């Protein structure tokens, strides 16, 4: 059987009904990962995966009630810790790093019976929008070898689209789950800030980072959210808000729902050359009883500048711990203590990471702090209050995930600002801390998928998963 | 347009514990100027919020102050490039 064509839900059913063994599944995916080696989306297949699968199968022989993810093969982005397994954040600096503990999400997956089969490629330290910043080579788009997989969770999204695991996890600081999901034609969910524990996720910008699923279907994303969401004593920013059943809105209609579209987005859509496709979608939603409403988020356009001040500032601070002493490689040429820091960081950090550290230090430095960092921090709060106002008039916001289809490898890698503009539509959810899901809805001029972004109220992942499920089943798959 | 001097770039490199060649310094200067020009849009933005409109999410609950086991010394040192007798090995700091 071609397991790559099945959803997580179908794979769970097969495993629970003992119609497939964990060994068969893991063997299948490992072979498939090897067949797609040239895509470079998986950095390592963990060599204990098959042994763990055999243990699961032994367990299943004598037990009737199996945990929900029993035997399910999962790939993790290379910045999520899995105890006693390597993790590099796609950086040369972390080449020899072995996780001393598991992330809370990893722990939850394992407790629910999952098998972590490997780690996926990404932009170094999650900084980038194309996975071209990986120190281990670019991860190619699942559908077109000449195109990027997106980023920074490009490896996870490409792997998901190629069917290299039942589901994958990514992390999203400015669009790093949703943009690659869009480029590869899969579903990606960035949860509300604080919904999923960040313990064991290598920090990039701590006030914006969230872990989330990249899945074949919206329902699969919901199934995974039911497992990974919730408060964690090890993450001070994880929320005490109760966790609903995220699959509750699967197969629901959208009659009576109101979708807001920010007025600037309506203008921007006209510049994406796919205006007709959005209009067609809006008509479809209206024909099913929903209302499309123009809403005002007056400072929407400040999202990108705010982000490119706050994220580098936090990154500068977070990456200060990489010093050539505690858990990274050390430059062989270093002798004096300053040389250990400077030579190691200079030798092993990639260009984009250096650029962001320098930029972060600039906006935090004396004389510039108030004009840049402090002001951006306040503007972030202002943007958040504007979004809360907008949600008084609608149930969810609709936005494109990206300007267009996946772009060519090399097309934007020499121009940092044009690469940063990639995040135009996604960043705003991180800054305002709201959940947002990308679901494929159309194909672009080259036949590659386009994602629609549905952003929800704080902690209302359940509704946007339901809306995404509706569009996926009645619009995207109906084509 | 935002202007940065080469001396400023050198200073930022020092703050960042990075060393740049003069070619890298020039490239970094150009990149930073381009990025700053783009983020400078916030300069003209008016901040217009009252504290009660910021929609704060309730966070920061504190657990009981009980001693809990952390990771072992062995685990903490397992990724150090050099360690000896339970310590990180670094260069001599004072001559």
Image (cartoon, coloured by chain):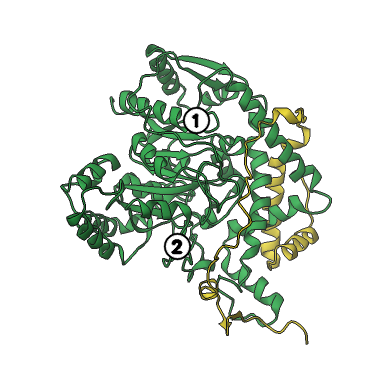
Name the subunit of mark 2.
A
Q: Position of residue B7 (x, y in %)?
A: 80, 61
Q: Quadrant of the C terminus of chain B?
A: bottom right
Nearer to the camera, A194 or A97: A194
In this rendering, the answer to whether A16 lies above or below B45 is below
Can you identify the residue that label 1 sits on? A460
Q: Relative to residue A51, is residue A182 drawn left or right? A: right
Q: Residue B19 is drawn in which quadrant?
A: bottom right
Cα distance between the residues tagged 1 and 2: 37 Å
Name the residue: 69% across, 53% down. A359
Chain letter belonging to callout 1: A
Residue A213 appears in view: yes
Residues beneath discs 1 and 2 located on the same chain: yes
Colour for chain A in the figure: green
Disc number placed over residue A209 in the picture, else none: none
Which chain comes out yellow in the rendered image? B
Check residue A136 in the rendering and tell me which mark sits there, or answer none.
Answer: 2
């Amino acid at each position: 059987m071609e397991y790559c064509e099945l959803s997580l839900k179908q794979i769970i059913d097969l495993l629970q009904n003992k119609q497939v063994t964990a060994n068969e599944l893991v063997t299948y995916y490992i072979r498939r990962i090897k067949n797609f080696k040239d895509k470079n989306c998986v950095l390592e297949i963990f060599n204990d995966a098959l042994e763990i699968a055999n243990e699961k199968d032994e367990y299943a022989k004598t037990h009737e009630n199996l945990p929900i993810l029993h035997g399910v093969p999962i790939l993790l982005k290379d910045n999520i810790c899995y105890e006693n397994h390597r993790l590099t954040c796609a950086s040369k600096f972390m080449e020899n790093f072995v996780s001393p503990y598991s992330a809370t999400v990893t722990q939850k997956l394992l407790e629910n019976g999952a098998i972590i089969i490997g780690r996926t490629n990404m932009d170094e330290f999650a900084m980038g929008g194309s996975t071209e910043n990986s120190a281990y080579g670019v991860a190619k788009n699942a559908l077109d070898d000449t195109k990027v997989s997106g980023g920074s969770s490009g490896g996870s999204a490409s792997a998901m689209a190629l069917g290299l695991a039942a589901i994958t996890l990514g992390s999203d600081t400015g669009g790093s789950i949703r943009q690659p999901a869009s480029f590869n034609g899969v579903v990606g969910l960035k949860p509300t800030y604080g919904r999923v524990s960040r313990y064991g996720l290598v920090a990039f910008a701590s006030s914006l980072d969230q872990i989330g699923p990249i899945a074949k279907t919206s329902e699969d994303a919901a199934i995974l959210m039911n497992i990974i969401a919730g408060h964690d004593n090890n993450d001070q920013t994880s929320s005490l808000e109760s966790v609903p059943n995220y699959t509750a809105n699967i197969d629901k209609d959208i009659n009576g729902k109101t979708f807001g579209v920010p007025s600037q987005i309506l203008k921007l859509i006209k510049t994406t050359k796919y205006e007709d496709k959005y209009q067609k979608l809006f008509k479809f939603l209206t024909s099913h009883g929903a209302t499309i409403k123009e809403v005002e988020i007056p400072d929407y356009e400040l999202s990108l500048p705010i982000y490119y001040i706050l994220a580098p500032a936090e990154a500068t601070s977070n990456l200060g711990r990489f010093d050539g002493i505690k858990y990274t490689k050390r430059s062989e040429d270093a002798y004096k203590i300053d040389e250990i820091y400077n030579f190691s960081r200079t030798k092993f950090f990639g260009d984009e990471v250096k650029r962001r550290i320098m930029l972060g230090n600039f906006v935090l430095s004396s004389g510039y702090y108030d004009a840049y960092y402090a002001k951006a921090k306040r503007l972030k709060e202002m943007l958040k209050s504007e979004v809360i106002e907008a949600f008084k008039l609608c149930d969810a916001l609709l936005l494109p995930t990206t300007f267009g289809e996946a772009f060519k490898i090399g097309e934007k890698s020499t121009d940092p600002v044009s690469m940063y503009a990639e995040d135009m539509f996604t960043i705003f959810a991180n800054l305002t801390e709201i959940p947002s899901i990308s679901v494929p809805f159309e194909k672009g001029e080259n036949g590659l998928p386009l994602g629609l972004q549905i952003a929800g109220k704080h902690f209302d992942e359940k509704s946007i998963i339901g809306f995404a499920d509706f569009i996926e089943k009645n619009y995207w798959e109906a084509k | 347009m935002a202007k940065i001097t080469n001396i400023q770039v050198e200073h930022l490199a020092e703050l960042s514990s990075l060393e740049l060649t003069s070619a890298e310094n020039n490239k970094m200067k150009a990149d930073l100027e381009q990025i700053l020009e783009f983020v400078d849009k916030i300069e003209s933005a008016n901040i217009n919020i009252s504290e009660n409109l910021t929609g704060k999410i309730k966070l920061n609950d504190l657990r009981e102050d009980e001693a809990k086991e952390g990771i072992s010394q062995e685990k903490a040192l397992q990724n150090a490039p050099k360690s000896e007798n339970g310590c990180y090995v670094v260069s001599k700091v004072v001559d």
